[in-house]
Image: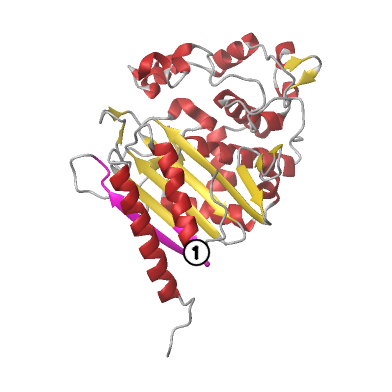
């Protein structure tokens, strides 16, 4: 029997060739990348690939169940939980955040305009990059002489919720929330996590597990503090080949999740289907700048009737990317260990090359 143009065998051969060629070019151009795992959904079929090694100097390759830190992609899970809280009538997405804080926080408003819950996840709250808001909490502090996660762990050692709220009291926002372009804030996502824990009377970790991870069958995804120490994670390296710590626990709801290609493909299928009200709500644009928009931490690009959603994550030593090309039905997951200064842009270029070759009509990442 003659195979049609779109049989599974033909599709597999085509996807395989495209991913292997694009990944080979990427690894040649970015030699600091030690290993990489990629997942693709094309025409309803999932494909998985692993390249390189989990640690420098070994030949042990990652698998589709290798658990990588996914950094800021964590925020899309926090966003989904916030959207689910709206569905459950625990809160309203436009509520004044102070409604869910004990005590007075006059500092969380500007000229009578308060920070709203959705501002926490579209990065227009006016809150700083991290709390405590000190130079050491910036990734580029002191030329990275001390790894970022090491500095953050030191800052957050014995740092309690009371300490977070104390530092939150010290903040002063300089503009009406939502009135200026997004300014990246991990503190906003952390605060959203605390609000969620309060309205559900449980921990953020348990809420995440019950609401998203278990229903979607994401059995290998966990917050860093909860992940088993089974050697299942790759080692991360910086541009100088220095091995970096991978304990992202201090990032909390802003970036502490670890996940796998297999699990993230399930997550992106849920995002693509857009059937659940929580997923739909998290995709509602809150910031619109021409064809570009930001929802609840999802970045979105709409042009010529096509719609792309994506989020990337970067933490020293590791990079991640999840995207959904809606009309083409393409989902893509990229996880890697070992990065240099050029890897972030290179990661997006890799994704665009795969998208373009799978469907020339696809929207590229900007």
Give the image quarter of residue 299.
top right
Residue at the location (57% across, 40% down)? 76
Residue 331 image offset from top left, x and y in percent: 52, 56
Secondary-structure class at tag 1? strand
| First to last magenta residue range | 40-55
- Residue 135, relative to residue 76: is it above or below? above
Along the horizontal axis of the image, is 113 left or right of 1?
Answer: right
Residue 102 image offset from top left, x and y in percent: 70, 17
Q: Is residue 104 shown to the viewer in this render? A: no
161 and 278: which is toward the camera: 278
Residue 179 image offset from top left, x and y in percent: 73, 25
Q: Is residue 136 shown to the viewer in this render? A: yes
- Residue 108, relative to residue 236: is it above or below? above
Residue at the location (53% across, 47% down)? 213
Along the horizontal axis of the image, is 294 left or right of 67?
Answer: right
Q: Main secondary structure of the magenta part?
A: strand
Give the position of the C terminus as an image quadrant. Answer: top right
Residue at the location (43% across, 37% down)? 344
């Amino acid at each position: 029997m003659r195979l049609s143009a779109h049989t599974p065998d033909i599709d597999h051969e085509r996807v395989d060739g495209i991913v292997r060629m694009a990944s080979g070019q990427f690894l040649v151009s970015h030699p600091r990348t030690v290993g990489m795992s990629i997942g693709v959904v094309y025409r309803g079929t999932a494909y998985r690939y692993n390249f390189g090694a989990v640690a420098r100097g070994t030949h042990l390759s990652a698998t589709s169940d290798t658990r990588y830190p996914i950094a800021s992609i964590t925020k899309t899970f926090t966003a989904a939980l916030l959207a689910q809280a709206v569905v459950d009538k625990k809160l309203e997405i436009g509520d004044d955040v102070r409604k869910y804080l004990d005590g007075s926080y006059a500092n969380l408003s500007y000229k009578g305009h308060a920070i709203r819950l959705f501002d926490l996840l579209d990065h227009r709250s006016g809150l700083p990059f991290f709390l405590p808001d000190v130079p050491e909490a910036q990734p580029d502090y002191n030329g990275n002489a001390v790894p970022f996660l090491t500095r953050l762990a030191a800052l957050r050692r014995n740092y309690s919720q009371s300490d977070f709220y104390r530092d939150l009291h010290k903040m002063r926002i300089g503009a009406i929330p939502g009135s200026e372009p997004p300014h990246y804030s991990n503190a906003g996502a952390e605060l959203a996590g605390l609000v969620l824990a309060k309205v559900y009377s449980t921990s953020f970790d348990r809420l995440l597990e019950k609401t998203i991870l278990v229903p979607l069958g994401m059995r290998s995804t966990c917050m860093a503090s909860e992940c088993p120490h089974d050697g299942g994670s790759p080692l991360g390296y910086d541009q100088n080949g220095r091995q970096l710590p991978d304990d992202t626990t201090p990032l909390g709801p802003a970036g502490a999740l670890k996940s796998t290609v297999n699990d993230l493909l399930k997550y992106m299928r849920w995002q693509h289907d857009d059937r659940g009200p929580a997923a739909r709500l998290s995709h509602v644009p809150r910031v619109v700048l021409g064809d570009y928009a930001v929802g609840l931490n999802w970045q979105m690009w709409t042009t010529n009737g096509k719609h792309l959603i994506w989020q990337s994550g970067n933490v020293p030593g590791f990079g991640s990317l999840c995207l959904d090309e809606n009309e083409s039905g393409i989902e893509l997951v990229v996880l890697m260990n070992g990065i240099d200064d050029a890897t972030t842009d290179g990661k997006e270029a890799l994704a665009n090359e795969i998208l373009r070759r799978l469907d020339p009509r696809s929207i590229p990442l900007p």
